[in-house]
Image (cartoon, rainbow, N blue to C red):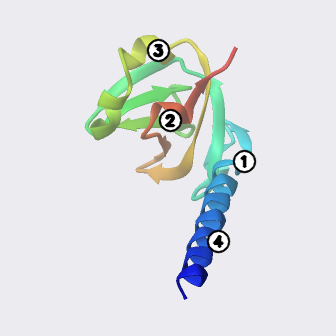
């Protein structure tokens, strides 16, 4: 009976590690910031050049455009401490892609990013 349990535990461990690897390797579609509002509720990579940053009650926004009909990347206040240094200096003026779920916030659209690894600076 002990050997069967050991084999079962090892099997379940291997299956769970494989499942975690499959989720981490999952890819999401890339969309430009102008098309992101067509993907509400979906997880996508949003691409664009950050024109400026803006502080708000929810956190720091990375704006691709002054037009609120286009998606903005939101770094929520509780997660700002996870981003080393100045968010403005790190992202303003740079082309980025950020991954997350597109949501509607008032009249605009946001993609909340809670970890620095979810934002990539493109060359």
Frontmost of labels 1 and 4 is 4
Q: Quick check: marks 2 and 4 in contact, CB under 8 Å? A: no
Q: Which residue is mark 3?
A: 90
Frontmost of labels 2 and 4 is 4
Disc nearer the start of the sequence (3/1) = 1
The residue lying furthest to the bottom in this view is 1
Disc nearer the start of the sequence (1/4) = 4
How packed mark 1 is, by other alpha carbons closer than 10 Å (few <14, some 14-19, many 20 or more), is few
Q: Judging from the image, what secondary structure is the residue with disc 2 in?
A: strand
Alpha carbon distance from label 4 to label 3: 44 Å
Q: Which residue is mark 4?
A: 11
Left/right of residue 107 with respect to residue 17 in the rendered view: left
What is the x, y in percent for residue 28? 70, 48
What is the x, y in percent for residue 38? 66, 51
Q: Which residue is mark 1?
A: 27
Q: Judging from the image, what secondary structure is the residue with disc 4 in?
A: helix
Front-most of 75 and 35? 75
Front-most of 105 and 19? 19
Frontmost of labels 3 and 1 is 1
Alpha carbon distance from label 1 to label 4: 27 Å
Frontmost of labels 4 and 3 is 4
């Amino acid at each position: 009976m002990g050997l069967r349990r050991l084999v079962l535990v090892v099997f379940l461990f291997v299956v769970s590690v494989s499942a975690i690897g499959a989720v981490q390797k999952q890819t999401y579609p890339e969309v430009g910031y102008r098309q992101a509002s067509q993907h509400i509720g979906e997880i996508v990579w949003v691409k664009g050049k950050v024109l400026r940053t803006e502080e708000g009650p929810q956190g720091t926004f990375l704006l691709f455009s002054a037009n609120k009909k286009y998606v903005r990347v939101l770094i929520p206040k509780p997660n700002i401490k996870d981003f080393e240094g100045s968010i403005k200096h790190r992202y303003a003026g740079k082309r980025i892609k950020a991954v997350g779920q597109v949501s509607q916030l008032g009249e605009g659209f946001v993609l909340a990013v809670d970890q620095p690894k979810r934002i990539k600076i493109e060359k």
